[in-house]
Amino acid sequence: MTSAPESHVTTSDSVVSVKDVQKHYGALHVLKDINLNVTKGEVVVVLGPSGSGKSTLCRAINRLETIDSGEIRVGGDLLPEEGKALATLRAEVGMVFQSFNLFANKTILENVTLGPLKVRGMKKSEADALALKLLARVGVENQKDKLPSQLSGGQQQRVAIARALAMQPKVMLFDEPTSALDPEMINEVLDTMVGLAKEGMTMIVVTHEMGFARKAADRFVFMADGQIVEEATPEEFFTNAKSERAKDFLSKLITN
Ligand SMILES: Nc1ncnc2c1ncn2[C@@H]1O[C@H](COP(=O)(O)OP(=O)(O)O)[C@@H](O)[C@H]1O
Ligand SMILES: [Mg+2]
């Protein structure tokens, strides 16, 4: 373990704090004593081989998965187990998955206004105005009356980002957001994410897009076998990875 001791400390500008988290799937120990602190405006890229627990960690932060022990806080508040308090807190975490998960029978505009209307209790006129602003920000406002199936994958993923932003989240979580996209659509999504990072959004991003990671990340968190093995700046990680697992991971990135 080479994770920095300061990552265990919860400071007042901590947006996400994960402390001593353990999780098993049956006999499989998928999260082994995870400690991670993400401060306001920070962009943390989570790297690691397939099966290392990256998605499980994201899902635990959003309470889509339970944990066995430990503590997860978002905006200083402990995540509640269930009920309305959970719906409200979950809305503080914007999640963008590999598959876009848009509602197929709702228009693009409706997909974005649904959360603000149902969870935030916003008036329709307000929700529409917010959605149009966000769709413009991700560059798909002219698609607002279409159904998701009428959009390209890259456009759908940008709508998914707008939908998450519509909840005015404290943190955005991206779990391999471009890995289901055709190559020519990857950059339009990454550019949207770089824009968010520049505007100061707090972000946790699981990605294999090293160009993006290098450009946007303040910090890399490298996971292997359910553990955070290493934390470093992008530069440190690429030039001076300490663990064998990280060196092995990097050598595969370069040769593939
Ligand atoms: N719902 C589940 N039930 C049982 N095992 C699971 C489940 N989800 C993930 N796993 C296992 O947990 C480990 C971590 O998975 P995951 O978090 O998806 O890794 P990553 O996102 O880094 O590829 C893997 O061994 C995976 O097979
Ligand atoms: Mg995954």
Image (cartoon, helix red, strand yellow):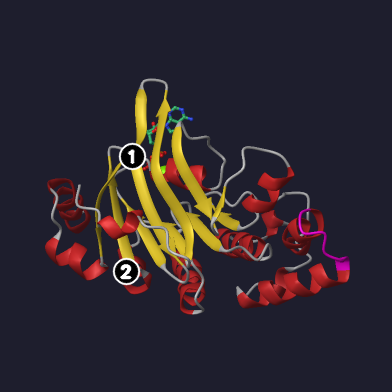
Up-down: is 173 above or below 213?
Answer: above
* In the image: residue 133, left or right of residue 208: right
Q: Give the mark nearest the N terminus, 2 or 1.
A: 1
**Of 74 and 210, which appears nearest the observer?**
74
* In the image: residue 208, left or right of residue 66: left
**Numbered disc 2: secondary structure:** helix
**Residue neighbourhood size for the residue with mark 2, other residues' Cα within 10 Å, grouped as few (<14), some (14–19), many (≥20):** few
**Numbered disc 1: secondary structure:** strand
At horizontal 45% and vertical 64% (from top left) the residue drawn is: 186
Give the extent of the magenta segment.
119-124
Q: Position of residue 182 (x, y in %)?
A: 46, 58
Quadrant position of residue 235: bottom left
Disc 1 marks which amino acid?
Answer: Asp
Disc 2 marks which amino acid?
Answer: Gly
Q: Nearer the viewer, mark 2 or mark 1?
A: 1
Quadrant position of residue 114: bottom right
Q: Is residue 187 visible?
A: yes
Q: Which residue is mark 1?
A: 33
Q: Which mark is residue 129?
A: none
Q: How much space separates mark 2 and mark 1, taking CA atoms?
A: 30 Å
